[in-house]
Image (cartoon, rainbow, N blue to C red):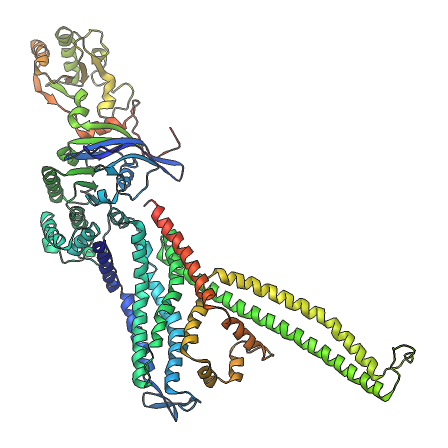
């Protein structure tokens, strides 16, 4: 068994070695780390090589460690690893299954005393290895960078390896299934990218639905408060009238003067109007909740790409650091800046952050297992 | 039930694709240990499907029997089988030696043995000088040589070669024949699937002819040609004169009726039910008659053929022909070639060749 496993691993290495894209991606990853290393922060501001950059932050606002960590999560992971390096890795690995099952090559492999499942899983792991090596270089580079330049050794950044690898594995499993179905590298790559953008769309819709629900919730809350307010005003007015011994219109034996428009009457009207507004707001909230629930269900089925990556930020940068780096006003403007109500964004953030790690990773892994299982089943049963 | 006496023992193998196309329709085939077995058939007859079933590349719809005494698909048995697929493609980033090492390892050959076998196999297929060149740069013939070496890396008891001489030059073909002969001498069983009938004829002990997913004929060449072996006498005269001589000599010599269809037919008459261009045994069958002695006789232009392997049976005919002044150009025993046998198997009684065999629906 070890003979075969070692041979497959050696072959995987040789295949990696033969793929130009692998080396190109690796070199680019190294360059990105080097560029980040040329950035620095001191009391005067941010520097690039020997030049000062006109940015409104310095090491008194953002500690050097936090600066590099945020560079790592904000740029390195969010942009480089989860977009550019992932796309490059998908391009580099999309051909693994179509190449494996190509006529002329699969026959020799299947004729050997090795199970199809093992062969399939080895190839899958090989695809992940492609990404894992990029991650290792990137995290290793940043570990050194933060240690040497930031003066703080942060082994926590190696958490990016399993997290980004997990994120990549969602997409790669889809790519593998599509490769098995279409036998085409280009088709499987394009459809995987489409699905990825679809997931991005679902995430955006999810955030919008949460915002809509939060808006409806706040709206109802405001109307309720406004109603309570009016009632309070009316009650205070009545109390004053009672105290002064004035007859209260509408109460027993006190007729309402014809055409009278005293304060109490106008308050009554306003209360009435506000009461009428409540069911509409409740109805809107119900509808918003229903849509939020539907999108949540759809999200539950699909892999949670951005939330998975978000786990890294949750773990690496503390909330205090985050608040220091980004004042509250800015945070409000960052997401859904067009929303007039600045109370909405914290609700959205809280809702998203309240989703458990079990839900984020658990449901995504279930998706991956189902997709991978389907691909393995097809591979094990198909005639070649 | 599997029998250890056979390297391949298959009974009633069926393969139906997508519930419609019947590629194999009850194939029963037995290959003895230590023999070179040829699998023939027209394109689409199901040969490659059968080989792929043996190698677990394709799953049979129904299959009884096994390989090397184990059920089909048994991993232990697969470890003792070598396989050269048709149109194989090896990873282009590997060198010839690396290909052998990699597939040897997948065949569970230990490292030290692999090292030794790689060197031996490269020597065997005459590829030692190209061992460190990537296979992506190989010619077709070189790839085929490495493919054969790959199939032999695990010192298999059974080797399946699917079109081994495809794209190989005459020197290479001879080398491959020699390798096959050497394997037979070493007691290994070899199954060859090939279109090159003359190549097969030179190396095969037994053959099976597969037509439209069924075994049409199976046996040694001697067994399969037993009823086709004959003596032929060719006269050195034109067909018309020869026919006159035959009419005069044969009735007395072998007891053929003077009114026989054979003697009355025009000298250059085509076979009754087939086009004149369709040569081969099946097409000629219609001009054949049975003699009182039980042997068959046929006449074609200036040649007379008698279905016997006994030279004594020819003496009266030679004497009679000579007595009627005939000059004999040649005389001798004949055995149909594998090609004759193949053509007979794939030609229907009405002279049509059976096409690609993946018959749709049941027949």
Nearest the eye: A101 or A263: A263
Q: Is residue A279 left or right of residue B78?
A: right
Q: Is residue A331 left or right of residue B106?
A: right
Residue at screen point 17% across, 21% down = B226
Nearest the eye: B288 or A276: A276
Residue A161 point in image, percent of width and height: 34, 70
Residue B21 vertical position relative to residue B146 in the rendered view, above or below: above
Residue B218 point in image, percent of width and height: 22, 28
Residue B331 vertical position relative to residue B159 in the rendered view, above or below: above
Residue A10 point in image, percent of width and height: 22, 60
Q: Quadrant of residue A94?
A: bottom left
Q: Quadrant of residue B301?
A: top left
Q: Is residue A260 left or right of residue A194?
A: right
Residue A95 point in image, percent of width and height: 32, 58
> Is residue A182 visible in the rendered structure shown here?
no
Q: Quadrant of residue B348?
A: top left
Residue at screen point 29% across, 29% down = B353
């Amino acid at each position: 068994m070890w003979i075969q496993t070692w041979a497959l691993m050696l072959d995987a290495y040789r295949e990696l070695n033969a793929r130009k894209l692998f080396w190109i991606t690796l070199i680019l990853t190294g360059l990105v780390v080097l560029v980040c290393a040329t950035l620095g922060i001191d009391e005067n501001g941010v520097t690039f090589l020997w030049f000062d950059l006109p940015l409104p932050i310095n090491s008194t606002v953002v500690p050097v460690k936090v600066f590099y960590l945020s560079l790592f999560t904000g740029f390195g992971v969010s942009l480089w690893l989860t977009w550019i390096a992932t796309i490059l890795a998908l391009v580099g690995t999309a051909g693994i299954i179509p190449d494996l099952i190509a006529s002329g090559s699969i026959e020799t492999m299947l004729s050997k005393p090795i199970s199809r499942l093992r062969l399939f899983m080895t190839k899958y792991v090989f695809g992940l290895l492609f990404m894992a090596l990029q991650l290792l270089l990137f995290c290793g580079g940043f570990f050194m960078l933060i240690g040497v330049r930031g003066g703080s050794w942060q082994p926590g950044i190696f958490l990016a390896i399993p997290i980004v690898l997990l994120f990549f594995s969602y997409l790669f499993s889809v790519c593998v299934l599509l490769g098995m179905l279409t036998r085409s590298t280009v088709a499987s790559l394009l459809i995987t990218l489409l699905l990825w953008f679809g997931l991005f769309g679902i995430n955006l819709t999810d955030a919008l639905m949460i915002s809509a629900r939060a808006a409806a919730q706040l709206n109802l809350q405001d109307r309720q408060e406004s109603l309570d307010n009016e009632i309070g005003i009316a009650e205070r007015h009545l109390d004053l009238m009672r105290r002064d011994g004035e007859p209260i219109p509408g109460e027993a034996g006190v007729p309402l003067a014809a055409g009278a428009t005293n304060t109490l009457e106008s308050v009554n009207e306003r209360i009435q109007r506000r009461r009428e507004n409540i069911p509409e707001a409740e109805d809107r909230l119900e509808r918003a909740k229903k849509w939020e629930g539907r999108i949540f269900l759809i999200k539950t089925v699909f892999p949670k790409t951005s939330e998975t990556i978000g786990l890294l930020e949750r773990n690496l940068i503390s909330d205090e650091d985050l608040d220091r780096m980004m004042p509250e006003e800015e945070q409000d403007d960052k997401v859904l800046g067009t929303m007039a109500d600045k109370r909405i964004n914290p609700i959205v953030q809280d809702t998203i952050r309240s989703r458990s790690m079990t839900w984020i990773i658990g449901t995504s892994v279930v998706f991956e297992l189902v997709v991978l299982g389907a691909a393995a089943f097809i591979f094990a049963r198909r005639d070649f | 039930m599997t029998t250890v006496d056979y390297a391949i023992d298959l009974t009633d193998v069926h393969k139906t694709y997508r519930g419609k196309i019947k590629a194999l329709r009850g194939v029963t085939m037995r290959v003895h240990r230590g023999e070179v077995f040829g699998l023939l058939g027209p394109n689409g007859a199901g040969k490659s499907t059968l080989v792929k079933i043996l190698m677990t590349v394709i799953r049979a719809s129904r299959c009884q029997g096994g390989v090397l005494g184990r059920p089909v698909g048994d991993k232990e048995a697969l470890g003792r089988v070598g396989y050269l697929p048709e149109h194989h493609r090896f990873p282009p980033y590997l060198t010839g030696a690396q290909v052998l090492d990699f597939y040897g390892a997948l065949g569970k050959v230990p490292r030290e043995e692999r090292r030794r076998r790689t060197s031996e196999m490269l020597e065997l297929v005459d590829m030692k000088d190209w061992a460190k060149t990537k296979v992506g740069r190989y010619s077709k013939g070189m790839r085929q040589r490495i493919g054969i070496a790959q199939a032999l890396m695990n010192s298999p008891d059974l080797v399946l070669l699917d079109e081994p001489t495809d794209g190989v030059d005459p020197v290479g073909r001879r080398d491959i024949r020699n390798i096959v002969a050497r394997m037979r001498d070493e007691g290994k069983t070899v199954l060859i699937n090939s279109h090159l009938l003359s190549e097969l004829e030179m190396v095969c002990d037994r053959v099976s002819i597969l037509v439209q997913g069924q075994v049409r004929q199976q046996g040694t060449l001697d067994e399969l040609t037993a009823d086709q072996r004959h003596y032929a006498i060719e006269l050195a005269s034109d067909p018309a004169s020869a026919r006159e001589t035959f009419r005069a000599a044969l009735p007395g010599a072998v007891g053929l009726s003077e009114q026989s269809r054979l003697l009355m037919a025009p000298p250059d008459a085509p076979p009754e039910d087939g086009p004149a261009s369709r040569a081969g045994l099946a097409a000629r069958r219609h001009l054949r008659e049975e003699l009182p002695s039980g042997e068959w006789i046929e006449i074609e232009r200036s040649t007379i053929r008698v279905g016997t392997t006994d030279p004594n049976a020819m003496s009266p005919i030679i004497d009679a022909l000579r007595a009627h002044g005939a000059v004999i150009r040649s005389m001798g025993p004949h055995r149909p070639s594998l090609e004759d046998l193949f053509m007979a198997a794939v030609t229907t009684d009405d002279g049509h060749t059976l096409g690609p065999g993946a018959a749709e629906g049941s027949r």
